[in-house]
Every structure is written in structure tokens, then in C-alpha cells.
Image (cartoon, rainbow, N blue to C red):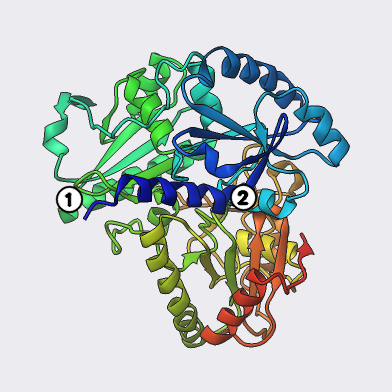
């Protein structure tokens, strides 16, 4: 049954109040947050000390005053300045509302919720609190008069056709397949390393008769680069400079390449960070590659999306690891079910089962005992050094390393000479260690005691209640 209009409005207003607090700061005093009902909200994360912010703010002020305010946009300044005097000085240049400077905890919550990793950042919301786009800065910059206000995302469409090896391929021919949108470019070294692996896997999938297709979405700079790079690929592609390339990058919020977005047969999203999942399963055993409940720390896709519960268990036996994971899985399932209901990710879960570059980095960041790197599954051979590579043991960049030893079977895996000498050595006996990484605030929390469902649940309760002491990386 549909809600009465007045009840719907009250629900929207209460969602904004819950998000932003009961009052905001206006030019002439406090403003009730509920007065924003029916408007499109732009959360403007900015600071006076930030050069790009000082460039963008006067433009946004002009666009707001001339067109966007009258069309129903209300901006709320969320300050990243260092003190209240600087906040007042900067806010004096703005004609809109602001989150009170004193409400720093809410500012941190908003930054985490909307994954703000740099400023200026402009997040567009419906009055219900639903996200329109996290990249509102691009939306208003490309349309400062608001011709397409409120910049609602266009529905995903495959389009009419693609480039194939033997000519055009109708989109209808892949409509019923699982689709891997492969965002990549020839100029990108990690892409050039991943593409041969994906091509080899693609051949395996086709041999098995798997209902899957890969679509290359190019980030190349010119047609010749596109042609050369696509020549190495066995799948179909969006034509160079086709508008779908730009649209899909925005729709799926692609922030770096290579990226693989996995779509189901009905074009709903299965996995926006499919690269890591596929890299751990090139054979397709877990097809269609739904995000794992507990991710492999060596493929940490999505670890920045929310506070991450990480179980370091590299020294445990396989049986001990499975027991620990079964305890953690209970909570992971619970939060995944909650995510499906709310659309928000509260926590992400990862485990380090082998000693690798990412687990080594996490151990270093969280001040845990370091471990020798695990022995690679394939043989390594001396390779040319130089830049553009990093050691998968110590995480140092190539120009910091002595010697480069690369996998002979095509894996994107390298060890420096020092890590090669240490790899495969006997591991010390260590208990499972659980840490919570809060990348948004550059800190971590360490759990004491054994990994049990109740233990982790109590740990998270203390985290949410503000009873834990954050340690800096």
C-alpha cells in the first residue's frame, strides 16, 4: 500500500535529520534541516587550505546563485578546515548552509559514509538521503546551468552493437549472458599485465561453455592505440570514443584501471570490483563471481568501502584457518544481509591465509610481527628491473629494490632479491590476530583474545560505542 504524501514527506525529512542533524548553520542563524524537504542536496566537502577547493568554490557560488538554487539545489558545506575561525572565514564566502563546525563526529561519519578520499568533493543526494552521485563536482562542472538537473543517472543500456573480430556484433546476441565490463587502456602497465591473464582465462571459459562475455571499455588516448591494444584481445569492445565509455565510467564510478564490473544476465550488478575476485579464480569455479563474504587480503578490492575486519592467519594450518573463518562467516553473512536491505555497507571482511605483499603491508601498518613471504606457486626468473613494478613480498617499488625476479608462467608477481631469499622459510607460530582497519581515518583497532563470533561481535560493539582507542598507522 502506498504511503500518504504527508507521511512520505515526514519520512524523507527524518532521513535528512538523521543524516545531517536537526539544524544547520545558515547566513542568519540556525536552519531546520527538515526545511530541505523536496530539495536536491549537495554536500560540499571543502577547506580553505586546499588549492583546488579555492578554485572550485567561487565557480560553485556563481552557478548556485545564477541557476542552481532556483532549480531546487541546496548546498551544505561540510568543512575540513582546522579550526573554527578558519571555518567562519571560509563560510563567509558561501551563500548556502553548513554543517556546524562543532559537529566533528558527524563530519567524520559523512566522510566515511560517502567515501570521501579527497577534496573538493561534492556529493549529490535526493531529499530522501538516497545518493544521486558521489561525483557531483563533475555533474555541475559539465552542466553549470542545470539543464539536466538534478543529474539523475541514466539507466544502464548495452546499446545497439559492439566491435567484434569479424565485424559488428549486435548487443542482442549477448543479452542473456553474464557480462564483464573490462575498463582498461594500453598506456596502463597494470592493464597490460592483467590483459594476457584475462585472455587466457577467457579461452578456458569458452572451452567450458560458460555463459559469459567480456566487453572492452577503452581508456586509450587515440584510435591507433585502441586498435593495437584491442588486437591482443579475443572478446568484443565498445567502439573507440563511443559515448558509452564515458557513461559507463560514471555509472559504475570507475576510479582506476584495470577495473572489471560484472553484470548478471539481466544487467544488474553482481560485482563492481570483479578484478580481484576473478584474479583469484581464473578457472571460473565461483562463476559468476559474486563478492566473497570474506575476501582474500591479497586481492583487497573494496577494502576502502567501509571499516574492514581483517583476520591475519597466515601461520595457521588449513584446518585452523577453516575453523576461524567459520566463526567470522557468521557475522559476514549477517552484515551482507543487512547490506541488501539498506544498500549500505557497514563492514567488509578479509582474511590473510598466506603471507603476501598486502598482508605484509597490513602487518607493518598495524605493528604486528612481520613474516617471510610465502613461496610462489610457479618458478621465478631474473627479469629486467626499472620502474613500473613492485615487490610482492615487501611492497617496495622497483626503484627501491635490489634485483627483480618475475613469475615465468605469466602471473603479475615479482620478488626482489631479499624477499626471494626469505620466501618459503618456516613460519613462526602465531595466533590469529583480528584488526579493524579504518582507512578513512588513517587508523586501526586491535582485538584481544581468540577469533570467535561472539568475540568479534563484542569488539565491533565496543568500536561502535566509542570505547576503543584508535591507533595510528
Residue in the foreground of this view, choosing between 263 and 352: 263
Secondary structure at badge 1 equals loop
| 138 with respect to 282 (left or right) | right
Q: Considering the image in quadrants, where does the C terminus appear?
A: bottom right
Taking the spot 65% from the left edge, 52% from the top edge, the residue there is: 391
Taking the spot 76% from the left edge, 45% from the top edge, the residue there is: 400
Determine crowd level at label 2: few under 14, some 14-19, many 20+ residues with C-alpha closer than 10 A: some
Secondary structure at badge 2 equals loop
The numbered mark, 2 or 1, whose residue comes first in the sequence reads 2
Determine crowd level at label 1: few under 14, some 14-19, many 20+ residues with C-alpha closer than 10 A: some
Residue in the foreground of this view, choosing between 157 and 182: 157
Q: Nearer the viewer, mark 2 or mark 1?
A: 2
* Residue 187 in view: no
Can you give x and y, in whole percent of width and height, for residue 126 in the image?
44, 38
Residue in the foreground of this view, choosing between 419 and 288: 288
Taking the spot 53% from the left edge, 44% from the top edge, the residue there is: 34
**Residue 22 marker:** 2
Pointer 1: what residue? 211
Can you give x and y, in whole percent of width and height, for residue 60 in the image?
62, 20
| 28 with respect to 186 (left or right) | right
Q: How many marks?
A: 2
**Residue 191 marker:** none
Can you give x and y, in whole percent of width and height, for residue 436 in the image?
64, 68
Can you give x and y, in whole percent of width and height, for residue 130 in the image?
44, 44
Query: Height in image: 216 above or below 371?
Result: above
Amino acid at each position: 500500500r502506498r504511503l500518504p504524501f504527508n507521511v512520505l514527506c515526514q519520512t524523507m525529512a527524518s532521513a535528512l535529520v538523521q543524516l545531517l542533524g536537526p539544524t544547520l548553520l545558515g547566513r542568519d542563524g540556525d536552519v531546520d534541516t527538515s526545511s530541505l524537504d523536496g530539495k536536491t542536496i549537495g554536500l560540499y566537502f571543502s577547506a580553505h587550505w586546499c588549492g583546488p577547493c579555492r578554485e572550485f568554490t567561487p565557480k560553485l557560488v556563481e552557478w548556485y546563485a545564477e541557476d542552481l538554487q532556483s532549480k531546487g539545489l541546496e548546498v551544505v558545506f561540510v568543512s575540513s578546515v582546522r579550526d573554527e575561525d578558519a571555518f567562519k572565514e571560509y563560510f563567509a564566502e558561501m551563500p548556502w548552509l553548513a554543517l556546524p563546525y562543532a559537529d566533528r563526529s558527524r563530519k567524520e561519519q559523512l566522510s566515511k559514509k560517502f567515501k570521501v578520499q579527497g577534496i573538493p568533493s561534492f556529493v549529490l543526494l535526493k531529499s530522501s538521503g538516497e545518493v544521486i552521485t558521489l561525483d557531483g563536482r563533475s555533474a555541475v562542472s559539465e552542466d553549470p546551468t542545470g539543464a539536466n538537473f538534478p543529474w539523475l543517472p541514466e539507466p544502464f543500456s548495452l546499446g545497439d552493437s559492439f566491435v567484434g573480430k569479424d565485424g559488428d556484433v549486435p548487443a542482442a546476441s549477448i543479452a542473456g549472458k553474464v557480462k564483464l565490463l573490462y575498463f582498461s587502456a594500453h598506456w596502463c602497465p597494470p592493464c597490460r599485465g592483467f590483459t594476457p591473464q584475462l585472455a587466457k582465462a577467457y579461452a578456458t571459459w569458452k572451452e567450458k561453455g560458460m555463459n559469459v562475455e567480456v566487453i572492452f571499455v577503452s581508456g586509450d588516448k587515440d584510435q591507433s592505440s585502441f586498435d593495437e591494444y584491442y588486437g591482443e584481445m579475443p572478446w568484443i569492445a565498445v567502439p573507440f570514443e563511443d559515448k558509452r565509455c564515458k557513461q559507463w565510467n560514471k555509472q559504475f564510478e570507475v576510479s582506476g584501471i584495470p577495473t572489471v564490473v560484472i553484470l548478471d544476465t539481466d544487467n544488474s550488478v553482481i560485482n563492481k570490483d570483479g578484478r580481484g575476485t576473478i584474479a583469484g579464480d581464473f578457472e571460473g569455479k565461483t562463476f559468476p563471481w559474486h563478492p566473497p563474504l570474506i575476501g582474500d587480503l591479497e586481492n583487497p578490492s573494496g577494502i576502502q568501502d567501509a571499516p574492514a575486519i581483517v583476520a591475519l592467519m597466515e601461520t595457521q594450518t588449513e584446518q585452523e584457518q577453516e575453523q576461524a573463518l567459520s566463526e567470522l562467516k557468521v557475522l559476514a553473512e549477517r552484515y551482507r544481509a543487512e547490506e541488501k536491505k539498506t544498500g549500505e555497507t557497514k563492514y567488509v571482511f578479509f582474511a590473510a591465509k598466506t603471507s603476501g605483499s598486502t598482508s605484509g603491508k597490513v602487518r607493518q601498518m598495524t605493528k604486528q610481527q612481520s613474516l617471510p613471504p610465502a613461496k610462489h606457486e610457479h618458478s621465478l626468473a631474473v627479469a629486467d628491473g626499472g620502474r613500473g613494478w613492485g615487490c610482492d613480498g615487501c611492497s617496495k617499488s622497483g626503484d627501491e629494490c635490489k634485483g627483480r625476479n618475475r613469475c615465468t608462467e605469466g602471473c603479475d608477481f615479482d620478488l626482489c632479491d631479499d624477499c626471494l631469499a626469505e620466501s618459503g622459510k618456516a613460519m613462526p607460530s602465531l595466533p590469529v590476530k583480528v584488526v579493524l582497519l579504518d582507512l578513512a581515518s588513517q587508523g586501526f583497532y586491535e582485538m584481544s583474545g581468540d577469533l570467535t563470533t561472539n568475540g568479534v561481535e563484542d569488539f565491533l560493539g565496543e568500536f561502535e560505542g566509542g570505547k576503543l582507542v584508535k591507533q595510528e598507522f
